[in-house]
Image (tube, rainbow, N blue to C red):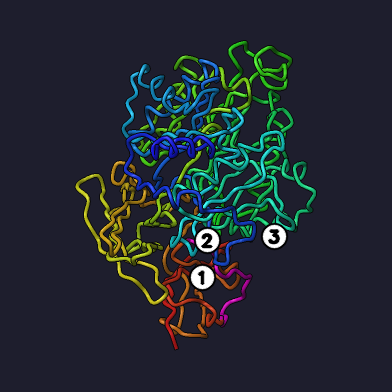
Amino acid sequence: MKIRQFYILIFLLGFSLSGNAQTNLPSNQTLFKKDIVTTPPNQPVRLMAEWEELEAIAVTYDLRFSEAKKKLIASIIQHAKEEVQVYIYCGGQSFRPSGRVRLELESRGIDSVNLQFFDSNFDQRIWIRDFGPQTAYLNTVNQRVLLDWIYEDDFPKADREVSKSLGSFYQTDVYSTMVRPYDFKFDGGNLQTDGMGMAITSSHIFEDNPHDDSTIDWIANEFMGVEEFIKLKKLPHDGIHHVDMHIKMIDEETLLIGEFPFGKGDYQQLETNINFLTENFKTSFGTDFKIHRIPMPADLNGQYPDETGDCSELGTGCYYTYTNALFVNKLILVPTYFGNNATDQAALQIWRDLMPGYKIIGIDCSEIIQEYGAIHCVTKEIGVERPLRIVHKKIEKACPDETEYLISTKVDHLSGIESVSVFYTDDSSFEELELTQNSEGDWEGAIPAFAENTEVRYYIEATANNGKTIARPIVGEKGAWQFKVDCGLTSSNNISRKGGISISPNPATDLVNIESNISRKGNLKIINQLGQVVKSQKVSLPNQLNISHLENGIYKVVLESERGMFYQRLVKTAN
């Protein structure tokens, strides 16, 4: 009798679990106690970047899905389960549809290892990206929480049950923007974030919300920790107006952006948006965005989304996108459309060149794209409970007369950090250099100098006090960053070299004297070890600068003049 009562309870609540997974399952008594929180977190919140370490991804699988949709979800599950847990929300007109979903997956050769099955009502929606829970962390990395925005009114079950059930499963808080004054309708596909307080979206959010720009920024800051909310004008021929259809942020400084042929599709507005972005915004490091392009090809009928056609559900050409991809730790799943022909392969090669060391897998999305979505749209990342986070401004280039290449990185974990090392090589074996923590909490050190034109590769590895170790890039030496010992400036009047200016005293605490025997005026910049410009002004030399406001550490002072570009190292110390 007790067993029967248990299953009746599960049926009435519309939620159940089964499968083989490593995640600890809460007791039946505590499983449903977590409620939606409708006020912002009372601690600083940070959105997770998509390249951060994942514990799981979530998908939906309804027994009433078309065969094409089932095949797509099954393909995603098959590859993702090799890296992470996969949470499958199961729906359909049957008691405990998870049992039938499991059998259907087994018939496709997919066992239940690393899978969790949730019986749930999600209104038969496949687009879990838009209504599923968004991972965020309080106090940088200390506590994982989930965010839930308002979804479409026509799909109330999808809007609430999926996020709430996962919050109960994890026994973590779910913060929702469903109640005034924080009411905010937002689709997860209309978001790209760097994990440092910057996010990119489209102007579609103004159509979904009655709020003005400042109110949206306020809500995004309160619930998501977004300090810079970049809103690009929506693309007219993208039926859903989500940025993930044409933009992918692949690290804190790098954007992979689709590219239409001249005059085709959304060419004009997309190029205008790129110009707007690069002219008005900097990365969280204070540097220029690095833009890489990937083709947005015509569909199988040779039509683009601005042309009348019979591919998309709106009666236009389909919106073929290769940016709608998914990071799954050391794996990246990329949509393909042409049976892996030369067009698909060229796009996959662009991904491989940008993300060396990652396993790049193409998955056919030629049918789902008819509804303006692909892999990213039908998946949702769930970050690890205790992330070991490494943030580093990559070295782009070095000059031959430098005696060392400064490395600085921020590393965070709830248990604290035991050690941080940089591994570097000139294509021989990797050498390890242990970094030391400065008074500001950053980890720093210096790679010894190499000969001119040497290609130097390096990556960072950190170990937390609890023994957890992770690398950045997450694939370690296989995806090591690379820079060349070459200033890269060819004009005789644009030579960047150490010297040309003198700084005294050095080290210094407050006032420094800047002199030059080469140039009397120019633009002076002070750059920290993350590559951020912390001070910039036009000067006449000699000049005296007040640096008392700067944090203690090592800086590069750069003088840009008509006689060239010169730099000198400055050490800022405490009083």
**Residue in view at x 45 percent, y 38 percent:** 5
- How far, Cα to Cα, is label 1 from label 2? 9 Å
User: Mark 3 is on which residue type?
Assistant: Trp
- Could one spot residue 291 in this view of the protein? no
Bounds of the magenta span?
Answer: 531-545
Rendering coords of residue 83 (x, y %): 34, 37
Question: Does label 1 or label 2 sit earlier along the sequence?
Answer: 1
Which of the marked residues, 2 or 3, is nearer the chain's N terminus?
Answer: 3
Is there a contact, CB below 8 Å, between mark 1 and mark 2?
Answer: yes
| Amino acid identity at mark 2 | Gly
The residue pinned by badge 2 equals 564
Farthest residue in the left direction? 429
Q: Position of residue 354 (x, y in %)?
A: 43, 38
Q: Which mark is residue 218?
A: 3
Q: Are marks 3 and 1 in contact (CB under 8 Å)?
A: no
- Where is residue 75, by image quadrant? top left
Is residue 501 rendered to the left or right of residue 177?
left
The one of 68 and 122 positioned closer to us in this rendering: 122
| Rendered image quadrant of residue 216 | bottom right
Q: Write down the residue under mark 1.
A: 518
Q: Which mark is residue 193?
A: none
Query: Residue 236 appears in which quarter of the rendering?
Result: top right
Of residues 437 and 520, the one drawn nearer to the viewer in this rendering: 437
